[in-house]
Image: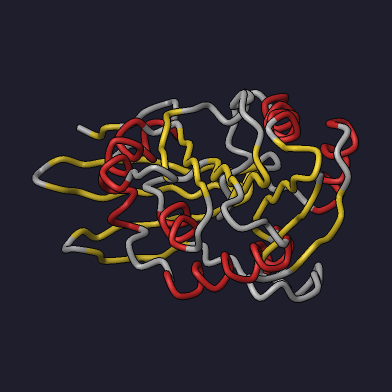
């Protein structure tokens, strides 16, 4: 029997298999990105940061070591439960739907690692940007770190086998109806599992339209975690700074 869920993002992100598949993410690169970003934004010492869609808190934990007051928020109850073991006076985690305001204002709100564009109702993409705006102090900055869709599609690996912790994941990627899909199939302990990821294939122009509708202003656009200039054809990332 294949186990599958229609509410893909809450089901897949809440499983241990999601974290197994992506366990080899580059922590050195992630930390360097946070160093570069916080220095560029000149966030004040002890300043407050909302890490929106924080997962198990890898960025939140590092930002806290830099001296910031960090709140990590994610829809995944299991991820937040895991992250709570690391809480301190200046690091907190909460289950939260990012398309709704957090009802607290921060010096910066970070939405990192393509944690945007998942919603079934497309209006929630706009609602998320409006919520980020509501959660920013007058001097605060919003950051969305998204894939560069042009680059991803040009370099798309259509099929891949990836073995992690003894589990063989079969991955299939494709573009359909304006969404980039990743089908994920594997077996574990005699059970067959099937999940998928789906993210809206937003371009910079699409974000610019959303920002205009939300009443926020795009200040800078970078193409990688070293904050080099964005190139639509060659940049791996689309890092947008707005307020």
Residue 192 image point, x, y percent = 21, 42
**Is 31 left or right of 22, judged from the image as shown?**
right
Residue nearest the viewer, comparing 170 with 225: 225
Q: Quadrant of residue 87?
A: top left
Q: Determine the residue located farthest toward the left in the rendered image.
A: 189
Residue 90 image point, x, y percent = 44, 45
Residue 213 image point, x, y percent = 88, 31
Which residue is depicted at the point 45% across and 31% down?
A: 75
Which residue is depicted at the point 32% across and 61% down?
A: 23
Colour theme: secondary structure
Q: How many numbered marks have been drawn onto this rendered protein structure?
A: 0
**Is 219 left or right of 241, judged from the image as shown?**
right
**Is 1 left or right of 126, judged from the image as shown?**
left
Residue nearest the viewer, comparing 23 with 179: 23
Which residue is depicted at the point 58% across and 46% down?
A: 49
Look at the image and tell me in which quarter the N terminus lies: top left
Q: Quadrant of residue 89?
A: top left
Measured along the vertical axis of the image, is residue 42 above or below residue 72?
A: below
Look at the image and tell me in which quarter the C terminus lies: top right
Measured along the vertical axis of the image, is residue 157 above or below residue 92?
A: below
Residue nearest the viewer, comparing 70 with 144: 70
**Is 240 left or right of 157, judged from the image as shown?**
right
Measured along the vertical axis of the image, is residue 161 above or below residue 204?
A: below
Which residue is depicted at the point 30% across and 48% down?
A: 86
Residue 78 image point, x, y percent = 30, 35
């Amino acid at each position: 029997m294949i186990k599958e869920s229609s509410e893909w993002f809450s089901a897949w992100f809440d499983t241990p298999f999601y974290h197994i598949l992506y366990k080899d993410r580059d922590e050195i690169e992630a930390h360097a990105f946070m160093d570069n970003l916080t220095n560029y934004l000149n966030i004040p010492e002890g300043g407050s940061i909302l890490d929106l869609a924080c997962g198990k808190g890898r960025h939140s934990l590092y930002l806290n070591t830099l001296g910031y007051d960090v709140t990590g928020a994610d829809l995944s109850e299991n991820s937040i439960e895991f992250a709570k073991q690391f809480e301190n006076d200046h690091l907190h985690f909460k289950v939260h739907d990012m398309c709704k305001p957090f009802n607290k204002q921060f010096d910066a709100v970070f939405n990192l690692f393509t944690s945007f564009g998942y919603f079934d109702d497309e209006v929630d993409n706009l609602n998320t940007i409006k919520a980020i705006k509501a959660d920013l102090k007058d001097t605060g900055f919003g950051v969305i770190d998204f894939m560069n869709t042009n680059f991803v599609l040009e370099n798309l690996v259509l099929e891949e086998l990836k073995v992690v912790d003894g589990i063989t994941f079969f991955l299939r990627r494709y573009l359909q109806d304006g969404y980039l899909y990743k089908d994920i199939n594997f077996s574990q302990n005699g059970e067959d599992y099937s999940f998928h990821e789906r993210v809206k294939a937003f371009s910079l122009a699409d974000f610019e339209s959303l920002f205009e509708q939300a009443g926020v202003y795009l200040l800078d656009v970078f193409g990688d975690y070293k904050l080099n200039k964005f190139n639509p054809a060659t940049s791996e990332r689309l890092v947008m700074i707005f307020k």
